């Protein structure tokens, strides 16, 4: 998950990385002019989309503030603005570290052509070396990748590499890009922009990063939900008609694919991880409450086919959750397969819920309830 | 060691379970035993439990391996403990590690892979439901209801989607020669492309089903490997995530479309170009495989 530049810089500055002076721009706050206004949102290519503007006077600043705040880039709304001191008279380099899953190594990337052109000129000039995730190995890789550059650039990178490699490792980043890395003639450097992709699996031992993420539930929606509730949930179509209570990432995705291909409109993605519920209906209660508040929903589809889950226990938890969320009055299609299926069917039947063992029939049934006038698809 | 597990002519190697005293692990030790897996020992740092499902529990891997001669470990410990458990297993001489835990940090996975490679061992996982050779053994929690001996090798990133496919296939008479969950993480022990070699000469396997999903380049890498070094058997594929919004992580740590990387279109095109039959729906896949392989499983 990509962090906002502001949050990434907060983490980097705390680790001794020089960044331009900057603040999260509060409503009505005065600016120290001139400065750069930078849209804060979890997407790249902000500069090309007009999300980064240099402003020199108040009128220009007011105008830029309004225009940036209204932008949408890569499907994301602007979460806020960072006002940052201008950096002038520096060369713009690029230094990046990324996990390479195919090589099972860290890809160290260096380019003398940083800045907004990194995708074009920068890519062509980029030098890539793979290394193991150890500080000394990353420093060596960086020196090797910079070997063809002029001495002043090499010196700046040699001074930046140890600090940035340490950040990449300590923060367990999946990607850490400094672009531009401003290089001054005196050999000093400043991280102009920071692109930091965090590993959500590492958050339990990254308290500072976890705290920054938890503070912005409106930006890091999925990660905040997962930290608070222990499973994955995301609304993918706010006007969707079918609420999904499903387990397993792959099957949950495929259910959405097959529904969408047939013109049905699933409201959410969900991987409830039914095997981790440990006799507690809290995950189901949470999700049913959200469904009760979703205006377009017509039906709830429950699909559990799991290796770990005892279905009778799950059925009991589902009934308990329904009792706790009486405001959810939507019809429910329940498809369960696995350990304890017979007992689960009896338990649900006693509560007036039919168990549908076949997934395609369950999908067709849910689609039909959502759109009674449409033809059933299966 | 994977080859030994896959070869029905060889005696099944002994298995230990690390983290055997956990709530889910206790249940699955019994289920694995019930399926015929030769579980020889458990390993747990809890000292108050002497046995689980009739197998002795040892304080560490070295003791468990010394006492039982086991060569395989199923690791069922919390996510931040997986790396240490793997190191302990490798130091004890374990040759095949199956880590079912979901949520292993990627930097840990990089380090774990380096340890496994240095030891010359094989790692399946993390975030995998395990692997099975139906009728012989299962390592992990693949559900018995979807397991049946047959001639289809199933390789899958997703547990649940492979359950659904295999359940439908077994009901239509198509069983598995082997079933390997490679797991949904980005950095993992065995990638699809690394299964091509062990399955090329695997006589019981007559066709392969690869169940992939959005994110990363694993499916594209498999396509490239198949082009370069053909497997000599039909390969079918099912891909999940056609309707996933860009930038949204879909449950698995690796399942995310980032710009133009990791899209379903890219995977589908690469696989098709490599001669893989890519199916859109689970039922299309079941129809195609049933037409070719029905009646092979009892």
Image (spheres, coloured by chain):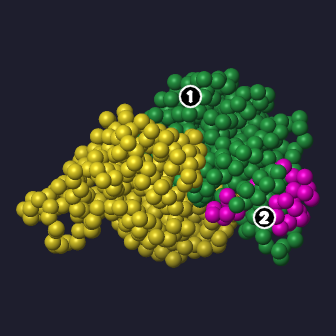
Residue A241 in view of the camera: no
| B157 over A347 or under it: above or below | above
Which residue is more in the foreground, B200 or A120? A120
- State the yellow chain: A
Residue placed farthest to the right in the image?
B67
| B7 over B105 or under it: above or below | above
Give coordinates of residue A224: x percent, y percent.
45, 67
Please tell me whether mark 1 sits on a helix, a strand or a loop: helix
Give coordinates of residue A58: x percent, y percent.
9, 64
Look at the image and tell me in which quarter the N terminus of chain A lies. bottom left
The picture's colour for chain B is: green
To which quarter of the image does residue B157 belong?
Answer: top right
Sequence-first tag of 1 and 2: 2
**Foreground label between 1 and 2:** 1
Q: Which residue is mark 1?
A: B224
Q: Which residue is mark 2?
A: B20
Magenta highlight range:
B54-83
Q: Is residue B247 left or right of residue A315?
A: left
């Amino acid at each position: 998950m990509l962090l906002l530049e502001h949050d990434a810089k907060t983490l980097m500055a705390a680790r001794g990385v020089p960044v331009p002076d900057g603040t999260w721009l509060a409503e009505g706050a005065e600016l120290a002019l001139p400065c750069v206004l930078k849209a804060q949102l979890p997407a790249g290519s902000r500069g090309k989309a007009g999300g980064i503007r240099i402003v020199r006077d108040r009128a220009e600043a007011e105008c830029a503030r309004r225009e940036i705040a209204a932008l949408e880039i890569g499907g994301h709304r602007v979460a806020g603005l960072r006002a940052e001191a201008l950096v002038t008279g520096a060369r713009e380099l690029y230094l990046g570290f990324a996990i390479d899953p195919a090589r099972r190594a860290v890809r160290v990337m260096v380019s003398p052509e940083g800045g907004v052109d990194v995708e074009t000129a920068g890519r062509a000039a980029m030098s890539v070396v793979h290394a193991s995730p150890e500080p000394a190995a990353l420093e060596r890789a960086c020196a090797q990748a910079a070997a063809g550059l002029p001495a002043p650039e090499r010196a700046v990178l040699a001074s930046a590499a140890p600090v940035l490699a340490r950040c990449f490792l300590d923060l367990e980043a999946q990607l850490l890009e400094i672009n531009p890395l401003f290089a001054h003639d005196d050999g000093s450097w400043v991280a102009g922009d920071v692109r930091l992709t965090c590993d959500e699996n590492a958050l339990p031992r990254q308290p500072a990063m976890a705290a920054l993420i938890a503070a912005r539930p409106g930006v890091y929606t999925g990660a905040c939900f997962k930290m608070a509730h222990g499973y994955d949930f995301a609304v993918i179509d706010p006007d969707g008609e079918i609420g999904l209570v499903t387990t397993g990432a792959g099957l949950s995705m495929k259910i959405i694919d097959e529904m969408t291909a047939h013109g049905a409109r699933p409201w959410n993605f969900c991987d409830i991880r039914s095997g981790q519920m440990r006799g507690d209906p809290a995950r189901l209660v949470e999700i049913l409450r959200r469904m009760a508040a979703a205006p377009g929903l017509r039906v709830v589809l429950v699909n559990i086919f799991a290796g770990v889950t005892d279905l009778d226990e799950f059925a009991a938890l589902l009934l308990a959750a329904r009792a706790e969320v009486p405001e959810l009055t939507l019809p429910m299609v329940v498809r369960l397969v696995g350990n304890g299926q017979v007992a689960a069917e009896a338990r649900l039947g006693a509560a007036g819920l039919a168990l549908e063992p076949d997934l395609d029939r369950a999908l067709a049934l849910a689609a039909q309830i959502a759109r009674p006038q449409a033809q059933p698809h299966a | 060691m994977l080859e030994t597990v896959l070869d029905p002519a060889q005696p099944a190697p002994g298995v230990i379970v690390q983290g055997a005293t956990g709530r889910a692990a206790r249940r699955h030790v019994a289920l694995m035993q019930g399926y015929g897996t030769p579980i020889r020992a458990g390993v747990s740092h809890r000292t108050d439990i002497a046995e689980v499902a009739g197998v002795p529990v040892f304080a560490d891997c070295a003791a468990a391996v010394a006492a039982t001669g086991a060569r395989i470990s199923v690791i069922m410990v919390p996510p931040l403990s997986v790396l240490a458990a793997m190191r302990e297993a490798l130091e004890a001489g374990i040759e095949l590690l199956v880590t079912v835990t979901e949520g292993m940090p990627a930097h840990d996975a990089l380090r774990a892979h380096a340890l496994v490679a240095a030891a010359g061992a094989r790692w399946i996982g993390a975030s995998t439901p395990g692997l099975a050779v139906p009728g012989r053994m299962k390592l992990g929690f693949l559900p018995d209801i979807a397991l049946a001996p047959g001639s289809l090798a199933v390789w899958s990133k997703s547990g649940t989607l492979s359950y659904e496919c295999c359940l439908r296939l077994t009901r239509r008479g198509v069983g598995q020669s082997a079933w390997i969950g490679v797991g949904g993480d980005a950095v993992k022990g065995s990638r699809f492309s690394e299964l091509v070699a062990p399955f090329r000469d695997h006589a019981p396997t007559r066709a392969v089903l690869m169940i992939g999903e959005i994110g990363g380049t694993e499916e594209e890498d498999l396509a490239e490997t198949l082009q370069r070094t053909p497997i000599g058997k039909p390969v079918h594929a099912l891909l999940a995530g056609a309707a996933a919004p860009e930038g949204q992580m879909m449950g698995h740590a690796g399942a995310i479309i980032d710009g133009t990387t990791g899209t379903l279109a890219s995977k589908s095109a690469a696989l098709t170009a490599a001669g893989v039959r890519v199916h859109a729906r689970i039922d299309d896949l079941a129809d195609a495989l049933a037409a070719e392989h029905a009646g092979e499983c009892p």
